[in-house]
Amino acid sequence: MTNRLYYSDPALQAFEAVVVRVERFADRLAVTLDRTAFYPTSGGQPFDTGTLGGLRVIDVVEADDGSIAHVLSPEPVTRNPESGARNLDPWNPGAAVHGVIDWPRRLDHMQQHTGQHVLSASFSRLFGARTVGFHLSAAVSTVDLDRELTPGELAAGETEANRIVWEDRPVSVRFASAEEAAQLPLRKESAREGTLRLIDVDGFDLSACGGTHVARTGGIGVIAVASWERFKGGQRIEFLCGGRALGRFRALRDTVSATVRLLSVLPEELPASIERLQAESRAQKRSLLALEIELARFRADELAASAEVTSAGRLVLRARDADAIGLKALASAIVAKPGCLVVLVSTTRPALVVAARSSDVSASAQQIVASLTAAFGGRGGGKPEFAQCGGLDASPDAILDAARAVIVARS
């Protein structure tokens, strides 16, 4: 079993250890030490990174026997003078190696994990909402509650959690047997047996946890609830602590500042301004559609007059520089005339296709579209009289030639 230095000293950034076991997985080494400050993925917290014997640690894995393996980068293994090796090969069992933790990553994890303890305790104390899940990744931290809280309750819990942060209470580590722990006011019962590691946020929270935490709540910096959603009958809450909260604030500040400059409004006027722009956009789209329909009537006369007369009807096969709305408007205007069968293709790639027929034509627009998507990919559908598809990976000429072939073969 590996001696876990982070259990008693989570602020330890460098350490010396002895190689116990070395395994090879393809071009990578997995090194087990007699002791380590590297945290393995466990309890919702990601593994530490850093260097070991001069090589990058890219994964840290806990084995069933309690040992911890450090997976090293695939660069060729060479003797490193800084590794502290006693032997010529620093990766022989018995060799001494020097490990260094990626401290910014570790500190981030400590802030998020300790913040989770405080935030979960706050929701539990104020509203009886129990935390049933916790996830910490490189970008997102979440807690899952067993019931939904209102926005007002979430804000109250956030405020209470930050009060504990700003009081800079000590966060201590102690150990207890399962029997002793059963007599203590743990926020959540532990299913683990044997000796338990307890994280004690002075006077506020006591939880069994094997993760890394800051020494005082002030080290969390700040706890900010970022978003929430319904999840499995309860609620999933995204939160940010310390450096992550600062990073998110900077991103939001820059976004708001840029938007304010573009719209020439004050920050507090942004919602109303965006709502106004959306209303104007909808009105413009309605006006544009009306104009396209009116224009399509004039173009329809021209295209219908130049249609190719076939046994399937008057055939209109054209490529147009238009979006789906424009293609549909033009096709609808053409087939309003008797005897027409239309296939219109956008000039973009992947292409859009609209197929339509007049009421007195028997050819199926739906079958034409199905044949085109089978030949060129994409998706679509519709009815025998009108169908459309998109995502066709071919030139307009190739699509129109294929459409003509389908029509001729079925006429």
Image: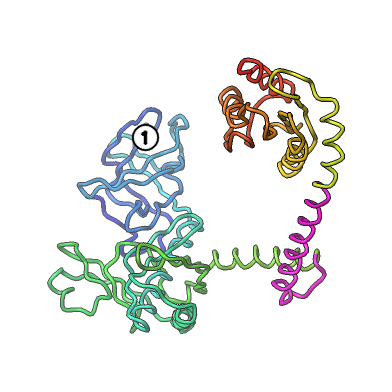
Q: Report the coloring of the rendering.
A: rainbow
Q: Is residue 377 left or right of residue 131?
A: right
Magenta-drawn stretch, dominant element (helix, strand or loop) = helix
**Kind of residue at disc 1:** Leu
Q: Is residue 360 magenta?
A: no
Q: Residue at x 26, y 68 (%)?
A: 208
Picture layout, residue 338 above or below residue 375: below
Residue 291 in magenta stretch: yes
Q: Quadrant of residue 269?
A: bottom right
Residue sitting at x 38%, y 57%: 45
SS category of the residue bearing label 1: strand
Asked if residue 135 lies left or right of residue 305, the reply is left
Inspect this view and state whether residue 388 appears: no
Q: Nearer the viewer, residue 348 or 184?
A: 348
Residue 103: percent from the left, percent from the top?
A: 48, 57
Residue 178, image quadrant: bottom left
Task: Answer above or below: position of 382 versus 373.
Answer: below
Residue 2 image offset from top left, x and y in percent: 25, 50
What residue is shown with label 1?
A: 29
Rendering quarter of residue 303:
top right
Q: Nearer the viewer, residue 53 or 231?
A: 231
Q: Nearer the viewer, residue 238 or 78?
A: 238
- Work out whether residue 53 or residue 266 is closer to the camera in this orientation and state it: 266
Segment tinted magenta in the rendering: 263-292
* Residue plotted at (41% across, 81% down): 169
User: Left or right: where does residue 66 sit relative to residue 370?
Assistant: left
